[in-house]
Image: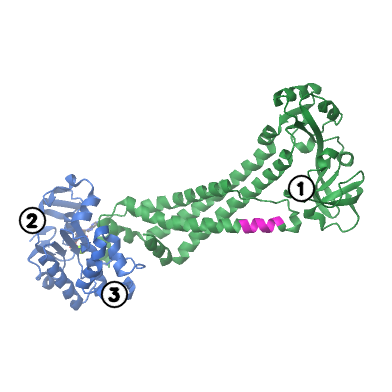
Chain colours: A green, B blue
């Protein structure tokens, strides 16, 4: 069975190669776009999720980048029952040194400790700590962020590309840079009060803020939905293109092989059996293409992650669920692309075998 | 056993088969002869269930096609085919080509079958590496591997020289002698003499 399928593929190596390539290219594209989108979403949600049970942002804003929360709320929230700790963060982006755009994080003192020190110390006022991903770009003792100069206090490490390719400042310095007090506050709970009650209490403090559990915040973050939906749409187009090319290559192949199917029909093989043979052949190519695409995508992501120009921001990850999802989509695409040409070819009237004979 | 009564078949306005009745006994070797265009292929296609006649009755092994239900299963069990063109799959060996058509339990008999048909030594060769006569014998092996009750052949020697044609008819003779019913269409009168009976057709009628 399998050897025959293999032989059939080798009988027309050029054709099989074309099917293989079109499948591989479209599956690789799906992997890359999904992995990169997934990487962006998971990097940023890792930053948001890292600590804090609740997130406080400015109410009615399009994105956390525009959020401005008054830090005067910090002592007031801290005093609420059920709250153990409140930290603040500013998320911004700015030219840093010769790099055109770098993520800049302003952190309240209580939040620094989650960044691992690789060299030096956390930044005090007038100082900046650089992520290991871009540390090599700054050899002097100072760097410029926007139009301000900072003394480099040290280097930190992070698993997240967005962080290790970024710069940490004190909350006050970042506030002056981005003209705000804080982008968001992170509230840790001590467990003595239900989260819902604490959220109620925080909401009562100001009508210009929005309070969500970190989980709900990440799940409903509009930007993530946009990124994921775009990735899904582009993936669907890539799959569709793959499907169309398989279908067109298969149509030609099937036309060439119709007498092969005709003789089987004359000898009593069912259409389903013939379609099954063709699908088996195509699926074999599909599986090899899938594995090749997986390897290619992992390779390309590895390179993207290390490409200095990208500062580690393009940090695509292929998780097992993603690999399985793309696998299922790829196999579906393969079957769909092959099944119509296969069904049509299997419908050959064995009478054509007689007709061809009399013409020969 | 084949019984046909008053078969009629049109291609458009043309009456290609014009009221043919005939009976082929089990194990009989029948040759259909006639000039080109006389209707041999069309009659053979009807008798072998490949073509449904416009009217008339056909019974194979006592059953009418409507009662066969699954025509695939019927063909697989009762009917073998050889055409003028061999239709061997070029990328498979001769043995694999035969195996492709064979029922699972018949596969082990293939080497012996090929040996008996005189192509045992080329079992592993591909179709384009052997001679025309060998190819046609391979096509016959594929047609008889499931031991069909009836073997149909349409101009099986049409692409062969006279020596290879003789060999093919020798083979048919021995297959018939083992009890298989044979219906072979050929325009070659001399070869047809090898059959038990010749059915001559002209303009879609028996002569
Ligand atoms: N598919 C077809 N469409 C139209 N006419 C056909 C077709 N096949 C055969 N014919 C005509 O039917 C007649 C019988 O043809 P055929 O059965 O092939 O005869 P033979 O096999 O004896 O040469 C011929 O006149 C031929 O032109
Ligand atoms: Mg003919």
Q: Chain of mark 3?
A: B
Along the polypeptide, which appears first: circle 3 or circle 2? 2
As helix, strand or loop, the secondary structure at mark 1 comes to helix
Foreground pick, B74 / B19: B74
Q: Is residue B88 above or below residue B13?
A: below
Q: Which residue is rendered at x = 74% and y = 28% of the image?
A: A211
Return the residue at label 2. Answer: B23
Please tell me how many numbered marks the rendered image carries.
Answer: 3
Q: Quadrant of ligand 1?
A: bottom left
Magenta span: predominant SS is helix
Is residue A330 inside the magenta stretch?
no
Which class describes the residues within 10 Å of circle 2: few (<14), some (14-19), or many (20+)? few
Return the residue at label 1. Answer: A163
Foreground pick, A202 / A9: A202
Q: Chain of mark 2?
A: B
Q: Is mark 1 within 8 Å of ligand 1?
A: no
Q: Is residue B176 visible?
A: yes
Specify start and end residues of the magenta stretch as a single range: A298-305
Foreground pick, A29 / A213: A213
Q: List x then y, in percent, for residue A183.
A: 80, 36
Indicate which disc residue B122 carries.
3
Which of the two marks, 1 or 2, is nearer to us in this view? 1
Q: Which residue is rendered at x = 17% and y = 61% of the image?
A: B151
């Amino acid at each position: 069975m399998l050897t025959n399928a293999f032989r059939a593929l080798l009988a027309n190596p050029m054709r099989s190669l074309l099917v293989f390539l079109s499948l591989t290219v479209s599956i690789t594209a799906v992997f890359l776009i999904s992995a990169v989108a997934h990487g962006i979403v998971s990097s940023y949600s890792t930053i948001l999720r890292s600590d804090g049970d609740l997130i406080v942002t400015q109410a009615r804003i399009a994105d956390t980048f525009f959020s401005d929360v008054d830090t005067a709320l910090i002592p007031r929230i801290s005093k609420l029952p059920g709250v153990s700790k409140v930290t603040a963060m500013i998320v911004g982006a700015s030219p840093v040194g010769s790099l055109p755009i770098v993520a800049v994080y302003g952190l309240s003192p209580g939040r620094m400790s989650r960044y691992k020190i690789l060299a030096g110390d956390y930044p005090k006022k007038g100082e900046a700590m650089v992520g290991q991903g871009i540390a090599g770009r700054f050899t002097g003792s100072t760097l410029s962020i926007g139009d301000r100069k900072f003394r480099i206090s040290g280097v930190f490490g992070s698993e997240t590309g967005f962080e290790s390719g970024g710069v940490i400042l004190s909350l006050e310095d970042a506030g002056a840079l981005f003209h705000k007090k804080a982008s968001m506050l992170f509230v840790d709970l001590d467990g003595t009060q239900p989260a819902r009650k604490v959220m109620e209490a925080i909401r009562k403090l100001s009508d210009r803020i929005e309070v969500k559990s970190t989980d709900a915040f990440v799940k409903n973050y509009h930007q993530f939905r946009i990124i994921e939906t775009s990735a899904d749409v582009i993936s669907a187009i890539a799959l569709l293109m793959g499907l169309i090319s398989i279908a067109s290559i298969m149509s030609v192949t099937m036309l060439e092989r119709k007498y092969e199917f005709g003789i089987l029909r004359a000898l009593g093989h069912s259409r389903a059996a013939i379609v099954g043979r063709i699908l088996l052949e195509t699926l074999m190519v599909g599986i090899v293409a899938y594995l090749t695409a997986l390897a290619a995508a992992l390779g390309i992501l590895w390179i993207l992650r290390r490409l200095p120009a990208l500062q580690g921001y393009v940090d695509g990850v292929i998780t097992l669920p993603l690999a399985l999802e793309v696998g299922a989509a790829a196999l579906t695409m393969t079957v769909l692309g092959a099944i119509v040409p296969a069904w049509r070819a299997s419908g050959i009237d064995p009478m054509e075998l007689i007709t061809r004979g009399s013409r020969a | 056993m084949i019984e046909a009564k008053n078969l009629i078949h049109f291609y458009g306005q043309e009456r290609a088969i014009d009221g043919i009745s005939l009976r082929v006994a089990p194990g009989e070797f029948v040759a259909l002869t006639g000039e080109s265009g006389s209707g041999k292929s069309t009659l053979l296609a009807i008798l072998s269930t490949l073509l449904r006649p416009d009217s008339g009755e056909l019974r194979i092994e006592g059953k009418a096609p409507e009662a066969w239900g699954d025509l695939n299963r019927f063909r697989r069990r009762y009917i073998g085919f050889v055409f003028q063109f061999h239709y061997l799959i070029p990328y498979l060996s001769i043995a694999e080509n035969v195996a492709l058509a064979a029922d699972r339990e018949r596969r082990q008999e293939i080497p012996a079958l090929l040996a008996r048909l005189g192509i045992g030594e080329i079992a592993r060769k591909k179709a384009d590496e052997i001679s025309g006569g060998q190819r046609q014998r391979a096509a016959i092996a594929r047609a008889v591997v499931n031991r069909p009750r009836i073997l149909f052949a349409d101009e099986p020697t049409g692409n062969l020289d006279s020596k290879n044609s003789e060999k093919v008819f020798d083979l048919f003779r021995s297959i018939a002698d083992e009890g298989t019913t044979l219906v072979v269409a050929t325009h070659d009168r001399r070869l047809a003499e090898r059959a038990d009976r010749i059915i001559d057709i002209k303009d879609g009628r028996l002569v």
